[in-house]
Amino acid sequence: MSYEAQLDEFFGDAKNRSYAASIINKLTAQHKHGLIAEIRDRGQAEMADRIREIVEYLVNDAIKGRRYTSSVLPTIVSPQLAPNFWFKNEKKPTREEVYRLLHLILTGLYRGSYVVNLDNAKPTLREDFRKSLIQENILIFPEGGVGGGVNIKKIFTQLNLARFPVVEFGFTLLILSCFVKWLKNKVEKPEFLKRVEEMGLPQIISDIGVDDSLSLVFFNIPRQKKEMHIFPRLKDFIARWYHDFLTGAEDIDLLLFLSSLYIVDENFKEISDAVMNKFIYYLLRGHINGELLVDMINIKIKHELEERRRGIYPIQRVREILRRI
């Protein structure tokens, strides 16, 4: 099924149209005049009702202009703002490619300006995962055009976390961990566990749809600077960092390790957020940044030495993490 057809099917549900309207409102914030601005001025309900019209406008605009725009590919500089900014041998977008990008963004899991989705996933895999999040009240639909998106408190409860940096890549890792927890319900069965022993975890998760082509995509779509990051080789990452969890452990070692290093004290939170965000970015790319790891530990030690009103909160799951490095 084409991405255009998949998106049209997604829009068949009024709740999905309302959900996507919340995202597209942020994605097209730079449209101050024209069709999209006129629709936006009439309210969120109007954007939801006319979501197909807005998408078709964005697709035709990209095809007609023979280049991607920031409303389709968030890393692109608008030609109106930078008319001379043109990549050599830049590929002209096709209709299917534009719909693919819009499908990734508008069906993604969002919180504020952050959107995360799975790329190259089988439609049934992505849809079943999404349905499970809705059933567990982790993914919430907007009410009257307000709110909606990912419920972080529910994620913390599901993943047994008390704290975690909900910044760009921390949020991305949390969504991935929810996906892995959902996979666990499929993998953690006697017949699968026996096959894991015989064939290895990478082969087993490939059999249920997590193959070498699967990638994680992160978008940040605030009013100003927009970003897009792609994290490939998701199967290898899952097999490396979630092996114990998928084969019986109750908690995810990686999350508990990072959570125990995270500082929420107002005097340390800003620097802790920044350093951990960078560390998780490299981690998702398959690299352990030793310098950032040392920085996180030093921040943790400094905080514990200065905070003498309570007992030391130890760094958790160190042995398990070192075994995976």
Image (spheres, rainbow, N blue to C red):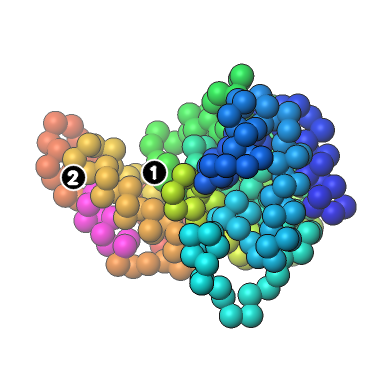
The residue closer to the viewer here, 253 or 73, is: 73
Q: Main secondary structure of the magenta part?
A: helix
How crowded pointer 1 is (Cα within 10 Å; few <14, some 14-19, many 20+) is rated as: many
Residue denoted by label 2: 303
Dividing the picture into quadrants, the one containing residue 7 is top right
**Residue drawn at point x = 27 percent, y = 42 percent:** 269
Image height of 320 relative to 287, above or below: above
Determine whether the residue tagged by mark 1 lies in a helix, strand or loop. loop
Residue 264 x/y as whole percent: 29, 38
Magenta stretch holds residue 293:
yes
Residue 110, label in figure: none
Q: Is residue 210 found left or right of 219 in the rendered image?
A: right
The residue closer to the viewer here, 252 or 58, is: 58
Furthest residue to the bottom? Answer: 88
Residue 288 x/y as whole percent: 42, 66
Residue 85 appears in the picture as rendered = yes
Image height of 238 relative to 137, above or below: below
Residue 235 appears in the picture as rendered = no
Residue denoted by label 1: 165
The residue closer to the viewer here, 141 or 102, is: 102
**Residue drawn at point x = 80 percent, y = 52 percent:** 3
Furthest residue to the right? Answer: 1
Q: Amino acid at mark 2?
A: His
**Residue drawn at point x = 82 percent, y = 33 percent:** 12
Q: Amino acid at mark 1?
A: Pro
Q: Is residue 166 found left or right of 234 in the rendered image?
A: left
Magenta stretch?
Answer: 292-300
Quarter in which the C terminus is drawn = bottom left
Residue 140 x/y as whole percent: 61, 27
